Amino acid sequence: MPETPPAIELVGIDKRFGAVHANKDIHLSVAKGSIHGIIGENGAGKSTLMSILYGFYHADAGEIRVDGRPTQIRTSQDAIVAGIGMVHQHFMLVENFTVLENVVLGAEGGATLGKGVAKVRTALKKLSDDYQLEVDPDAVVEELPVGLQQRVEILKAMVRGAEILILDEPTGVLTPAEADHLFKVLRVLKEQGKTVVLITHKLREIMAITDTVSVMRRGEMVATRKTADTTVEELAELMVGRRVLLRVQKGAAHPGEVLLSVRGLTVRDGRGVTMVDDVSFDVRAGEIVGIAGVAGNGQSELLECIAGIRRQSAGQVFVAGTEVSPKVGPDALRRLGLAHIPEDRHHMGLVLAFEEYENAILGYHDDPKLLKGPFLDIDACRRDAEEKIAKYDIRPPNCRLKTANFSGGNQQKIVVAREIERDPKVLIIGQPTRGVDIGAIEFIHRRIVEMRDAGKAILLVSVELDEIRSLADRILVMFAGRVVGEETPEAGEQALGLLMAGIAA
Ligand SMILES: Nc1ncnc2c1ncn2[C@@H]1O[C@H](COP(=O)(O)OP(=O)(O)OP(=O)(O)O)[C@@H](O)[C@H]1O
């Protein structure tokens, strides 16, 4: 019997962006009916490679073969015709359309009216059942939780006949339960003979779900392993080129005076729904207080309120003993010594159209060190940015590059460096390592612990329970807007999980 050709074969793919050599002579073979993981440091070139495969970018050299046939992929339409579907990190859905409308939109054959729509509805129902996607075709997308929106993206690809599905960091935005469901869907896809390419920073996911894993480093494909034959430690080392500490090292905390105090804080969203409900806690100098919880239980609103981005409807916030009026904005808070690493770097942390050095000082442009008379000293700003680039290993090391052209993880490092290096008294942090590779996670975690040991008060929100447990000295669990329990980091995952699910101990 003739051997089945690989679902995808990349032969000598090469791509440069100016001075950045993003993909260097890449060879990759993805077996049909397998789940193939791709891992690599931030900026290693993973998204670029997948964008070439999906027709967003054109390779400077090399060939793409699909099912053994050389295939020209010049646009995403070519990719769809070749049977390739993609689920992006940032979904590409029309939010006020229904699921069905989103799936119909742009579907091949222009099925926009009457019978066409009825056909898509039937196809959607079948695919939804076959792959356990469980999505209501008439639900409006913006009213669906993130996990379901992602399933709509998968459905969209499947309706267009995808045989190969590429997912770029699909679990970054999911709750643990949603991630579990996604993996179930991917396994069903595989059982049905589909091929899945999964880009992720989470080695646990690689070990749990992939058959094969390829590692990229600095634009090159450095290794491919059968998942069963490798370990997390080996993969970490292959990615970063050195051994990585997979655990945070920290001594006991020595809490001092209270630097952040929250009393009876209540926050309502734009529709008047109570998101934070009568929350009180203190964070002392020299301690890290973690807030655990499933995304959407008020943690984001709590952080935004303390950071001066949202107003409370009741309650008080004190920073270093001074009561912060609800009218005080982020600038005045910065002057009180509060720094904020926001959860969503795109909406709140960065202006993507700015050059890197402009973002590196965003919000701090009244720092006397950066001024010459009343004006910004551009040379001083660039020097300041370059120091941070070196210290945080931000790549490429070019402070004049537009921020949009840095990879996701490097953008995150730009925000983290800016906020930590201003030496604040109180640091509030949301999802510090979202989209960040393990080498950089190790570095960011170490800096957070150093900040604690230097006497800063740190409030950390993360949906990664591992991250909370390894960094926090005390853990508050939020559910439905309330703090429902306090635990030590020694508390088991199960005990925390129950609290997070709203089941009191
Ligand atoms: N449009 C572009 N213009 C200039 N440089 C770019 C562009 N897109 C990507 N790059 C650069 O190419 C390199 C590879 O980026 P890519 O996004 O592929 O990395 P990645 O491995 O996906 O990283 P991450 O894990 O952080 O998402 C980076 O140095 C990035 O700055």
Image (cartoon, rainbow, N blue to C red):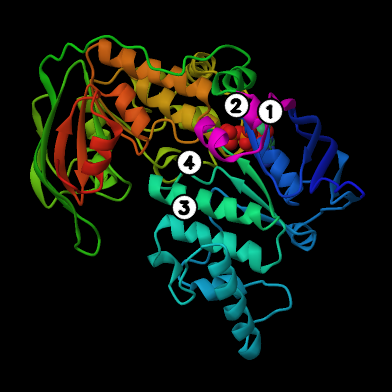
Rendered-image quadrant of the C terminus? top left
Of discs 1 and 4, which sits in the foreground?
1
Q: Which residue is mark 2?
A: 41
> Of 132 and 269, which appears nearest the observer?
132
Circle 3 Cα neighbour tier, 10 Å, few/some/many (<14 / 14–19 / ≥20): some
Task: For marks 1 and 4, give the CA distance.
Answer: 28 Å
Task: For marks 2 and 4, give the CA distance.
Answer: 23 Å
- Residue found at x 53% / y 63%: 152
| Visible residue check, residue 466 | yes
Check contact, mark 3 vs mark 2: CB within 8 A: no
Check contact, mark 3 vs mark 4: CB within 8 A: no
Q: Which residue is mark 3?
A: 181
The CB of the residue at mark 2 lies under 8 Å from ligand 1 = yes
Check contact, mark 1 vs mark 2: CB within 8 A: yes
Q: Which residue is mark 1?
A: 216
Comes first in the chain, label 1 or label 3: 3
Check contact, mark 1 vs mark 4: CB within 8 A: no
Say what secondary structure mark 4 lies in.
loop
Against 213, is 310 above or below?
below
Left or right: residue 378 versus residue 66 is left
Based on the displayed image, in which of its 4 quarters is residue 396 positioned? top right
Left or right: residue 80 versus residue 241 is right
